[in-house]
Amino acid sequence: MLLKIWHSLMSLFDWFANRRKSGPISQERQERDIADGLWSKCVACGVLAYTKDLRANQMVCPECGHHVRVDSNERIRQLIDANTWQPLDESISPADPLQFRDRKAYSDRLRETQEKTGLIDAVQTGFGQLDKFPVALAVMDFRFMGGSMGSVVGEKITRLIERATQKRYPVIIVCASGGARMQEGMLSLMQMAKISAALECHREARLLYIPILTNPTTGGVTASFAMLGDIIIAEPKATIGFAGRRVIEQTLREKLPEEFQTAEDLLQHGFVDAIVPRTQLKKTLAQLIDLHQPVAPTHHQILQLETIALTAREG
């Protein structure tokens, strides 16, 4: 053990010595290290951070607190206990019912995005344990066509909610989306109502639902399940809204405040319940789930329920 520590210290001393000899790190070398993934540059403050340390800090800049956008795999790793993730409906794949074509055919764009991201569509769903509490989790991935909500996204989230209702699990949905997927037209828009209906059944069963609004959460996602939570949580400085900022400014013909459509602005106006830094998110969710655990009925309450049921049958 001591020998390993000694070698590590010697390597560190050698690194500092070589750095002093070579002088300041050149811009070209910085860019090469960033491209190799060794270092990450914060888009907010410009500070370089060792990627391994940044990942250990939940991809939050240690200098300014900027929350780097993360993919669905990283989000699952952050929230779900190790070796407890059980993915659901991995085989459901999108179709091109409208034969949509803009600059490129929708089917071609789907295939290219699937190859690039390794995902079938813009959401991953499954069961897992969050600090030992069983949960149903859906995580949207902005890499896949801006996290847009098409038929597959709607179907997977709806199935997850329905299964969670049967198992009496709390539902957590991590939202990151530009809205409904225009390439699927009305088939995409109807997912808003379908997911909302499943959430109403979940609510009637007196079960917990928590949406987590990350950057960005906009369009049809905001207009449906993102705002239907029992407790709505947002990440710091996340963009949350329906129509885009430029669209609103062009419609109103006036400049909007800088803080418009930020998580902090929505918290002030009562649209979200709390802003939770990513480093505190898992702990906060575990506390909320623990507080909302169903209370086991007492022996006296069970006798009362049996008496009521017996009376009803005899009547």
Image (cartoon, helix red, strand yellow):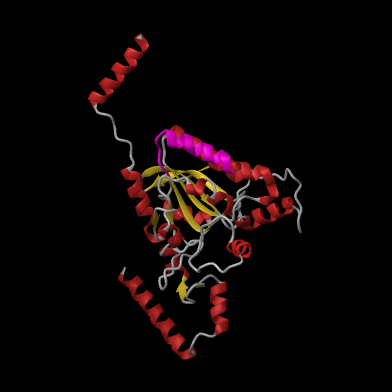
Q: Among all residues in the image, which is located at the extreme top? A: 314
- Residue 214: x and y in percent read 49, 57
Q: Position of residue 228 (x, y in %)?
A: 47, 45
Can residue 310 be seen here? The reply is yes
At x 34% / y 17%, what residue is drawn? 309
Instruction: Depth check: give the residue in front, 77 or 172.
Output: 172
Q: Which residues are magenta?
A: 192-209
Q: What percent of the width, then of the height, locates residue 82?
A: 42, 50
Residue 151: image quadrant is top right
Name the image quarter holding the N terminus.
Answer: bottom left
* Residue at x-position 45% and y-position 32%: 166
> Residue drawn at (58%, 68%), measured in percent from left and top?
254
With 94 as the anchor, is 239 left or right in this view? left
Residue 52 higher or lower than 203, as above or below = below
Question: What secondary structure is the stretch in magenta mostly built from?
Answer: helix
Give whichever of 164, 76 is nearer the camera: 164
Q: Is residue 92 visible?
A: no
Rendered position, 35 above or below 306: below
Q: Against 196, is 259 above or below?
A: below
User: Looking at the picture, how far across and down is residue 88, in whole percent?
Assistant: 53, 41
Q: Nearer the viewer, residue 306 or 32?
A: 306
Based on the picture, tell me whether residue 177 belongs to the magenta stretch.
Answer: no
Residue drawn at (63%, 45%) of the image: 189
99 above or below 315?
below
Q: Quadrant of the C terminus?
A: top left
